[in-house]
Amino acid sequence: MIKVSTNYSWIAAACLLAACGNSASSDKSAVDSTATKAPATASVLPDANLFKDSLDGKPTALYILRNKNNAAVAITNYGARVVSLLVPDKNGVMTDIAVGYDSIGKYIHQPESYFGAIVGRYGNRIAKGRFSLNGKEYKLATNNGPNSLHGGLKGFAAHVWDAKQLNDSTLELTYLSKDQEEGYPGNLQAKVTYTLSGDTVNSLKIDYEATTDKPTVVNLTNHTYFNLNGQGSGTINNHLLQFNADRYTPVDSTLIPTGKIEPVAGTPFDFRQPTAIGARVDSPNQQLKFGKGYDHNFVLNAGKGAGLNLAATVLGDQSGIFMEVWTMEPGIQFYGGNFMSGSNPLKGGKRDDHRTAFCLETQHYPDSPNEPSFPSTVLQPGKQYKTSTVYTFSVKK
Ligand code: BGC
């Protein structure tokens, strides 16, 4: 059972709306006639043999975690990434809700390189690949127009991590990012632990830890692309999304926050009630133009304590799979799959078509190292970076 603060009236609202069938989706109903049916047959896990390889002198493999409800997650140590996540839909059919490839070769060679990955040393963007710490300027590898995205040219996503399966449901992964890797100061020892639980509800917990030997910046997150109707099963436009966020961080044309924190009220960023993802995604809004859709950090409303707070809920319109995201982080990046183009071959012969998945990346805000008013991402030697995020999965009929 996860420990949570439950003082959000909107949670109850979310449950009521979604369960009674008279939900926000009917009046804000989006939208996409290309929606396809959720898979009627049970998803299967990928063939672990197709993940056995070696890269930079380290073996790659696929690790399977299961819980007592038969939910399962497949994780590869290449990028510490979630390859598959199987949970039951409203009919009890095991459904793979994580977009991914069926072999290690595709993870290494296909153009889309963040599926399921742990991204770091700094998740999301740092403006112009530069920041200053203690009066010294650091220059990072830039890989996204003028900016540095998700740690730079390789980032943590393209390294082989050391993996240790602790039991049926827990996998520990470690990675040493050396001083000056991609321009970042300090040897950073990172540890990520995935735990699949099933006591009260199926849940995937991700614990992040890191230490450094020089002052540095850290912002780790998970970049799973979700489709709650099943990966590759069509649009996410009709999924119902809700954020526990009254504010967000608007961006410039290169998706760097302007530094302002603005209310979502009266904008297409208002997801304080469950709303179809696609209902307003193409409305004439400058921020949506910059992101080519949603690609923005939401400022999470403060919870009661320093523990896990509910950040977001999403309901798969066809599967009935209901996901909650709980985190200790102050922000969450909502990326709506705007750059997905159908050019990557997914598991089961599916393709990554435009907006057929979304990411909810719990995080500190993008470009925090250059925005003194944002919560700090600096990690000092002798201190420990420690944060957790939990995704829970239930169903609504
Ligand atoms: C970014 C997007 C980017 C995507 C890559 C997201 O976190 O905000 O701009 O295209 O990651 O998969």
Image (cartoon, rainbow, N blue to C red):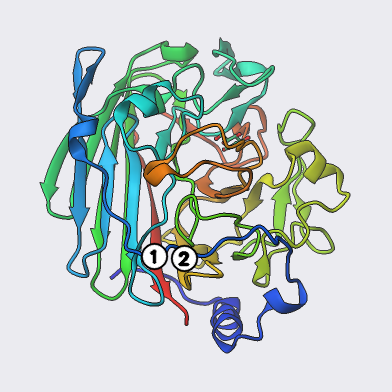
Q: Which residue is mark 1?
A: 392
Which corner quadrant of the image does residue 301 belong to? bottom right
Secondary structure of the residue carrying numbered label 2: strand
Which corner quadrant of the image does residue 339 belong to? top right
Q: Are there few (<14), some (14-19), or many (20+) residues within 10 Å of tag 1?
A: many
Q: Is ligand 1 closer than 8 angstroms to the Cβ of mark 2? A: no
Q: Are marks 1 and 2 in contact (CB under 8 Å)?
A: yes
Disc 2 residue type (three-letter): Glu
Give the quadrant of the N terminus: bottom left
Residue in front for this viewpoint, 222 or 374:
222
Image point (25%, 31%), residue name: 174
Residue 66: image location, x then y, percent: 19, 58
**Image disc number at residue 324:** 2
Q: Is ligand 1 closer than 8 angstroms to the Cβ of mark 1? A: no
Vertical placement of residue 395 versus 62, above or below: below
The quadrant of the rendered image in which ligand 1 is seen is top right
Vertical placement of residue 31 versus 234, above or below: below
Image point (60%, 38%), residue name: 340
Secondary structure of the residue carrying numbered label 1: strand
Vertical placement of residue 269 versus 294, above or below: below
Question: Quick check: can you spot residue 243?
Answer: no
Residue in front for this viewpoint, 167 or 319:
319
Image point (74%, 63%), residue name: 31
Disc 1 residue type (three-letter): Thr
From the viewer's perspective, tell me whether residue 4 is left or right of residue 176.
Answer: right
Which corner quadrant of the image does residue 128 belong to? top right
